[in-house]
């Protein structure tokens, strides 16, 4: 029942983990950061620019599993600076619209590659 999901349209894992794991009707997407999947470079910029790339990466992984952002039931969001919360939300809302998943958002002292944001997701059909 466990299936590893991987796509070239999102960054390859930078550690010993999978982009996502599908288990039955659920998809668990690993935390994504602002890495350009074509160059493997960090997208430099403010919280909006980095959030945009993170959500594009998540969408690509979800689509590779035959699902869509409308299937996301839960996100976990990590911000380097909680002062970016409103600006993060503005980008995030554009991706989920009326189908808002459950979520928590926490400030952390540091993220991989010193990015400003990381988001993971759980999807269900």
Image (cartoon, helix red, strand yellow):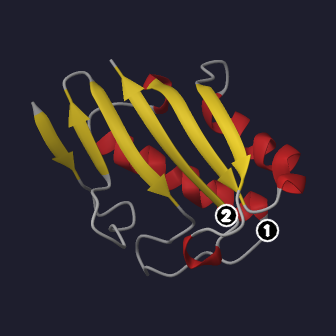
Tag 2's secondary structure? helix
Taking depth in this image into account, of 45 and 110 the one nearest to the observer is 110
Taking the image as shown, residue 66 lies to the left or right of residue 86, namely left
Residue placed at 70% from the left, 59% from the top? 108
Q: Position of residue 2 (x, y in %)?
A: 13, 36
Disc 1: CA contacts within 10 A as few (<14), some (14-19) or many (>=20): some
Q: Nearer the viewer, residue 16 or 88?
A: 16
Could you tell me residue 105's position as x and y percent? Answer: 70, 41
Query: Which quadrant is home to the N terminus?
Result: top left
Q: Quadrant of the C terminus?
A: top left
**Left or right, 18 with reference to 92:** left
Image x and y of residue 89, in percent: 78, 41
Name the residue rendered at 43%, 81% in the picture: 39
- Write down the quadrant of residue 90 in the picture: top right
- Determine the residue positioned at 90% across, 55% down: 83
Q: Which residue is mark 2?
A: 50
Q: Give the answer, above or below, for where 47 lies relative to 123.
A: below
At a point 32% along the width and 55% down the height, the residue shown is 19
Figure disc tally:
2
Q: Position of residue 100 (x, y in %)?
A: 63, 23
Q: Tell me if label 2 and label 1 are in contact, CB under 8 Å.
A: yes
Label 2 packing within 10 angstroms: few (<14), some (14-19), many (20+): many
The tag on residue 20 is: none
Residue 45 picture quarter:
bottom right
From the viewer's perspective, tell me whether residue 105 is left or right of residue 9: right
Instruction: From the image, tell me which residue sits under label 1.
Output: 46
Q: CA distance from mark 2 to mark 1?
A: 6 Å
- For numbered disc 1, what is the local secondary structure? loop
């Amino acid at each position: 029942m466990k299936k590893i999901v991987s796509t070239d349209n999102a960054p390859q894992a930078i550690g010993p983990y999978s982009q996502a794991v599908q288990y039955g009707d659920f998809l668990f997407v690993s935390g994504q950061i602002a890495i350009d999947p074509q160059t493997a470079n960090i997208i430099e910029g403010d919280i909006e620019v980095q959030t945009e790339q993170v959500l594009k990466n998540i969408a690509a992984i979800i689509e590779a599993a035959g699902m869509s952002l409308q299937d996301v039931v839960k996100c976990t969001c990590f911000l380097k600076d909680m002062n970016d919360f409103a600006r993060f939300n503005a980008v995030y809302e554009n991706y989920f619209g009326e189908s808002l998943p459950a979520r928590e958002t926490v400030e952390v002292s540091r993220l991989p590659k010193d990015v400003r944001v990381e988001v993971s997701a759980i999807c269900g059909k």
